[in-house]
Image (tube, rainbow, N blue to C red):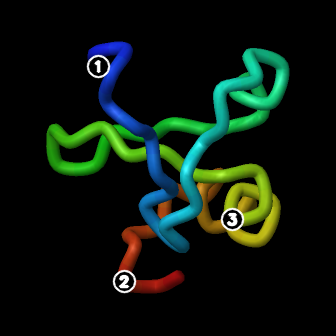
Amino acid sequence: MSAEEPVACARCGTLRGEDPAQALTWSTQVERGVRQWLCPDCSRTHVRDIEGKLPDEYW
């Protein structure tokens, strides 16, 4: 990922800000070889699905 490339939540589309402390709260996952980012709100909402490794279709 390049520094110019904006990071957006794969679920809701929220853009990650420039604050490094805030960036630490984001989650990442690799689904079918593609890296996806999740904002803190979506991560909290779907934590059981993520931990259970359920496919996105079940979310």
- Helix, strand or loop for disc 2: helix
Report the amino acid beneath label 3: Cys
Q: Earlier in the sequence, mark 3 or mark 2?
A: 3
Q: Earlier in the sequence, mark 1 or mark 3?
A: 1
Q: In the rendering, at what x and y percent does residue 29 appear?
A: 44, 40
Q: In the rendering, at what x and y percent does residue 37 appear?
A: 48, 45
Q: Quadrant of residue 3?
A: top left
Comparing 19 with 27, the one in front is 19
Asked if 37 appears above or below 46 in the picture, the reply is above
Report the amino acid beneath label 1: Met
- Helix, strand or loop for disc 1: loop
Q: Earlier in the sequence, mark 1 or mark 2?
A: 1
Between the residue at mark 1 and the residue at mark 3, the CA separation in whole angstroms equals: 21 Å
Tell me, for residue 42, which label it has, or none: 3
Whether residue 11 sits left or right of residue 24 in the image: it is left
Rate crowding at label 3 as few (under 14), some (14 to 19) or many (20 or more) other CA atoms within 10 Å. some
Between the residue at mark 1 and the residue at mark 2, the CA separation in whole angstroms equals: 26 Å
Q: In the rendering, at what x and y percent does residue 2 appear?
A: 28, 15
Between the residue at mark 3 and the residue at mark 2, the CA separation in whole angstroms equals: 15 Å
Tell me, for residue 57, which label it has, or none: 2
Residue tagged 1? 1
Asked if 58 appears above or below 25 in the picture, the reply is below
Q: Residue at x 17, y 49 (%)?
A: 32
Q: Report the mark closest to the observer, 1 or 2.
A: 1
